[in-house]
Image (tube, rainbow, N blue to C red):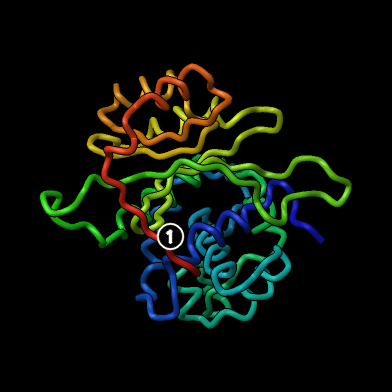
Amino acid sequence: MPAAQSCLIPVVVDRLAPVIDPDTDPRWATDLRKQLAGIPDPRDRRGVRHSIGSILALAAAAVVAGAQSFTAIGEWAADAPQPVLAALGTRFDPRQARYAAPDEATVRRVAGRVDGDLLDDVISNWLAHRDTSTTDPAETPPAAIAVDGKPLRGTFARTGGAGVHLLAAITHNTATVLGQRQVPAGNSEITWFQPLLDTIDLTGRVVTADALHTTAEHARYLHSRGADHVFTVKENQHRLHGLLDTLPWHEIPAHITSGSG
């Protein structure tokens, strides 16, 4: 059965799986839990037994381990060893002298009510601080950021209709997601271009995007933020395409790369 449109599982898979592998220091879970603890808890304080940070960290760990539904997350949590539950910050039950994991219903309720944009920002900041690929800026070209949108796998109902569509800013060299916003049904990616990049330091960066974002407004915005840009121009933008077509392209050195994967 396809996941509900509010389901965060595909997002977590896309964001965390590339940077967490079997050889990664297991302490990443504790580090991520500290970041997630700062997300406002949407639940009533009365009766809360599991912290928001531990629930979200547990869900992230389960998804990275292969869980693709809330049922699978609940089963993974029930089978998780005590050291893992301790690292994830789950509640310690003094009567049973063991760590107790939240059940599936608790994880489902929290995931369905948490602020998705805020969760994205927290994970983006965490990923950015874990990026160890930084080199001497004098020896490398400006870091490039790709802005691109995509519909999420598993979010389309069997009855049809739009699924969850996300617009993301991703580094070219490490594929680190620096920011992400959900584009509401009926809206265009163009509207969310600037709100997405408002939270990212663009000074000295090069921003790339497809032809949809080739607008004067976007170009002026990036210039005001101290960034350069590389946009695609198609023939449907008649005047701009005509002006560019008159440039001496045959005199410009070309660099071509190819690859397969």
The N terminus sits in image quarter:
bottom right
Out of 36 and 67, give the one closest to the viewer.
67
In the shown orientation, is residue 44 left or right of residue 1? left
State the image coordinates of residue 49 (x, y, percent, origin top left). 58, 58
Most extreme residue toward the left is 138
Residue 234 position, x and y percent, is 53, 31
Task: State the residue at coordinates (36%, 62%).
Answer: 31
The picture quadrant where one finds residue 248 is top left
Left or right: 138 in relation to 122: left
Percent across and percent down for residue 121 are: 44, 43
Front-most of residues 98 and 119? 119
Where 72 falls versus 106 (above or below)?
below
Q: Classify residue 163 by image quadrant.
A: top right
Q: Report the residue that reaches farthest toward the right.
A: 159
Count of numbered circles on the image: 1
Q: Could you tell me if residue 89 is visible in this image? A: no
Give whichever of 67, 46 is nearer the camera: 67
Say which residue appears at 50% left-offset and 74% top-offset: 85
Q: Is residue 18 left or right of residue 50?
A: left
Residue type marked 1: Arg
Residue at 26% x, 62% y is: 132
Image: 74 above or below 108? below
Q: x and y percent of residue 118 in the render?
A: 49, 41
Q: Tell me if residue 98 can be seen.
A: yes
Give the residue number, with chain letter if any, for mark 1: 33
The residue tagged with tag 1: helix, strand or loop? helix
Residue at image point 64% right, 58% down: 107
